[in-house]
Image (cartoon, rainbow, N blue to C red):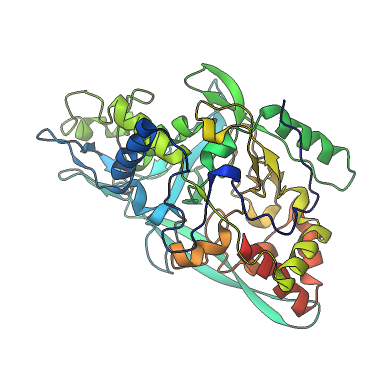
Amino acid sequence: MAPQLHSSEPVPANTELSGGEATVSDASAEAFGFPINGLSEESRSAFFVGRSFFRGNWVVAGPPATRAGLGPFFNARSCSACHGNDGRGRPPEAGQPLVEVLMRISVPGFDPHRRPLPDPVYGGQIAGQAVPGISREADVVAAYTDVPGQFSDGESYTLRRPTYTVTNLGYGPLAKDALLSPRAAPAMVGLGLLEAVPESQLRAIAKEQAGSGNGINGRLNSVWDITAGKMVAGRFGWKAEQPSVLQQTAGAFNEDMGLTTSLLPRESYTKNQAEVCEKKESDGTIDVGEKILQDVVLYSRTLAVPARRDVQNPVVLSGQRLFHQAGCAVCHVPTLVTGSSDIPQLANQTIHPYTDLLLHDMGDELSDKRPVYDAGGNDWRTPPLWGIGLVSKVNKHTFFLHDGRARSLSEAILWHGGEAKQSRENFRNMSKSDRDALLAFLNSL
């Protein structure tokens, strides 16, 4: 039977299985790191091999090694350096350089596949580290400005607006019209489930939103799929710029660590940097072998979703109702149904990710002014909310949104604008007890 669309109607109160059968009952600091149940012996073995390459440090090219090929430029030596415990990255303190947040860069315009044009000197991403003998590209330093506000009941709050300065440029100036976009590392759970949601279901949600007359108009991004050799729907990344876990993984290997794969076999440096980099370049062999790449992809696809907690708590139940009454569930769609998958445990699952995987205009305050395919500067993909209440345990922080500017879930809501402005105002106008109840619901996910 074909999966049916589930709308924004409230999830039954006792629904603990956020990932369907791919749910794990764990609320510890390791909650994001478990494999889904029922994997075959072969897949389970690949999961743990993939985890070792996800969490282990890579080294520079040189004597034969299983994790050699790092650089010439890179942001981190391992995937887990940003996705700690398979969770979220945190932004830097004021005056400190980026570590778990990446800085994408481009210039106005698109290539023939509508991908952003890279900066001619620094490429598509600023790298803060380099292999020995090569100058680092640059430092990106954060600063924050307080933005005061007030709830309708008189309680005050302060948001913080980030700004970034690119300093210590190692290869000359940035393009004068360079477009910068910081991106915090998101949590890794449930990616295979989201990949298995049929495109037709997402398009049906977009059609339902467009016909509602409430100003919510989600849409799919259209992105280049390297494997398929054509434009397809995007669903991963902060602007839904990646079509699959495979391409997302290969892109992270290449851009974040300077590691080549069969999908992206070119070293991560520009023509302007070629003279110095080619002196340090490896012998041209692929850094991440096909088996390792596929194992890391399987690992990323089969990380289980932690179960909900406190589902019978009266405050949580009240918060759940308020979440829907405020209109949050129109975009943070509670229930989706997966279709077919080459991993049986991901197929035909009723899941509760609280996302529509669609792009929405989130207003000027959150804009990075940097288009990616069909996503404009104001557009961001609705992030899944499952597991969000465990970030404080898994990653020891509560920073949210694409650049980590929000220091709490309340601040994250208060930054919403554009299509989400009315939902933000509904939250801002609630009584304190209702606001606390809504936040208790989010923390139960």
| Residue occupying image coordinates x 43% and y 45% | 35
Residue 284 in the image, given as x and y percentages of width and height? 21, 23
| Residue occupying image coordinates x 83% and y 37% | 208
Of all residues, the one furthest to the bottom in this rendering is: 154
Q: In which quarter of the image is the C terminus?
A: bottom right
Of all residues, the one furthest to the left in this rendering is: 63
The answer to which of 46 and 139 lies nearer the viewer is: 46
Task: Report the number of discs.
Answer: 0
Q: Is residue 223 visible?
A: yes
Q: Is residue 100 visible?
A: no
Of all residues, the one furthest to the top in this rendering is: 229
Is residue 155 shown left or right of residue 353?
Answer: right
Residue 190 in the image, given as x and y percentages of width and height? 53, 44
Question: Does 163 sit above or below residue 181?
Answer: below
Q: Quadrant of the N terminus?
A: top right
The answer to which of 339 and 257 lies nearer the viewer is: 339
Is residue 44 shown left or right of residue 440?
Answer: left
The answer to which of 258 and 308 lies nearer the viewer is: 308
Question: Does 420 sit above or below residue 107?
Answer: below
| Residue occupying image coordinates x 52% and y 68% | 144
Residue 389 in the image, given as x and y percentages of width and height? 57, 63
The quarter of the displayed image where residue 196 is located: top right
Is residue 85 shown left or right of residue 341?
Answer: left
| Residue occupying image coordinates x 42% and y 68% | 93
Residue 102 in the image, given as x and y percentages of width and height? 43, 50
